Amino acid sequence: MSRDALGEVVAELGERPYRARQLFEWLYQRRARDLDALSDLPRGLRSSLAERFSLRWPEIAERSLSFDGTRKYLFRLDGGATIESVYIPESDRRTICISTQAGCPLKCSFCLTGVAGYQRSLKTWEILGQVAAVMEDNPAAATHPDRRDEDPFPWNVVVMGMGEPLLNYEATASALRILMDPKGFALPPRKLTVSTVGILPALEKLAREDTPPNLAISLHAPDPGLRRALMPIEEKYPMADVLAAALAYPTPRGGRVTLEYVLLRGVNDTPAHARELARRLGRRRFKVNLIPLNPAPEIPFQAPRPGDVDAFAAVLVDAGVTVSVRRPRGQDILAACGQLHLKGPTPGSAVHA
Ligand code: SAH
């Protein structure tokens, strides 16, 4: 529930408005697990709340641990849909990758999420609950035992899991507002990144939010023809329009929008593709994140050769484009980009109940 929704509930119960603020903090800052824990609320209010609402987050059904420290979480939702979230510890930060839909309707040809089908969009609480559960499961003391301070490394949240966030705009945007609320999860907007193929009407709405998060655009091809072959959505939202909307997007602190580019061997990873991409981007303020394909048997593409990744990056750098290469994390447990899917646990992975 948003601040406004809590305000309405409190008003209906004949309580003063500050009770809504207390409730908001209990839910999203202290993340109480039980209405009984709300110790500074009158008992009467707690029991009227308990009659009408339940306080719960989605349950973690399974955890898989990668050799590189990445953890994948499987949540089983009401109605039986399953979604996955990923926890990615790094030396100086930790990142949670969350899902916004169970499956994905977009059917990009290189992404296992789309290949495995689509069930439904998630509710706000199911999106937020992934962050709450993963944070609770990875307290600072457990992940960095040598660091005694409260929160040694900042959290980042990336909306890059299953689904297309901008096809589930309302639930995603209200989750983002609570994640960024200083009295909620209190994540700075620049620590929050939404990745999208560029659903234009929703992207324009996101740009008009009071505090827009960082933006990453899934581009994956240097020209519309190749993009259409890989990503059916190009038909509806052409890359020229998506790039124009991305350039106009108000990033936190005026940072650059990221363009994600999955490298597929022999398909979009040659120096000619890189030159075409550089030409299209020109001197415009983007940064490009190259993602070597994370392969899977169901995906009809191969990972690029390491030398080709370097050569591709070098062409962009020479042309003055800012480039980074994404290191795969959690590939062994199918937790890397494009590997989350609707099936249950991965056979053979280390599963800790
Ligand atoms: N639907 C949104 C959110 C998912 S983000 C979007 O497409 O942006 C997941 C990122 O991983 C996207 O950039 C996606 O294109 C990329 N990806 C998908 N399949 C991949 C694969 N097999 N290997 C590497 N990256 C992949």
Image (cartoon, rainbow, N blue to C red):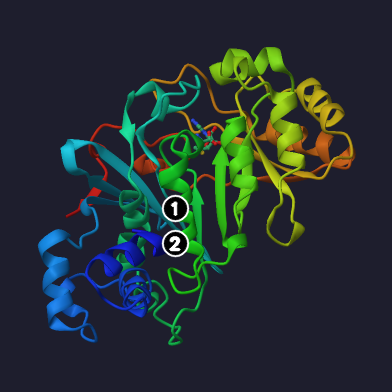
Residue 102 image point, x, y percent: 32, 35
- State the residue at coordinates (61%, 22%): 265
Mark seen at residue 174 = 1
Q: Are marks 1 and 2 in contact (CB under 8 Å)?
A: yes
Give, as a three-letter code, the residue at label 1: Ser
* Viewer-proximal residue among 318 and 210: 210
Q: Is residue 185 above or below residue 56?
A: below
Residue 65 image point, x, y percent: 32, 53
Q: Is residue 15 above or below residue 225?
A: below
- State the residue at coordinates (43%, 84%): 150
Asked whether, in this view, residue 292 is left or right of residue 72, the answer is right
- State the residue at coordinates (61%, 14%): 235
Asked whether residue 198 is in view, the answer is: no
Ligand 1 within 8 angstroms of badge 1 C-beta? no
Cα distance between the residues tagged 1 and 2: 6 Å
Give, as a three-letter code, the residue at label 2: Ile
Q: Is residue 221 above or below residue 99?
A: above
* Viewer-proximal residue among 235 and 310: 235
Quarter of image, res 262: top right
Name the residue tied to disc 2.
178
Asked whether residue 147 is in view, the answer is: yes
Are there few (<14), some (14-19), or many (20+) residues within 10 Å of tag 2?
many
Asked whether, in this view, residue 288 is left or right of residue 206, the answer is right
Element under label 1? helix
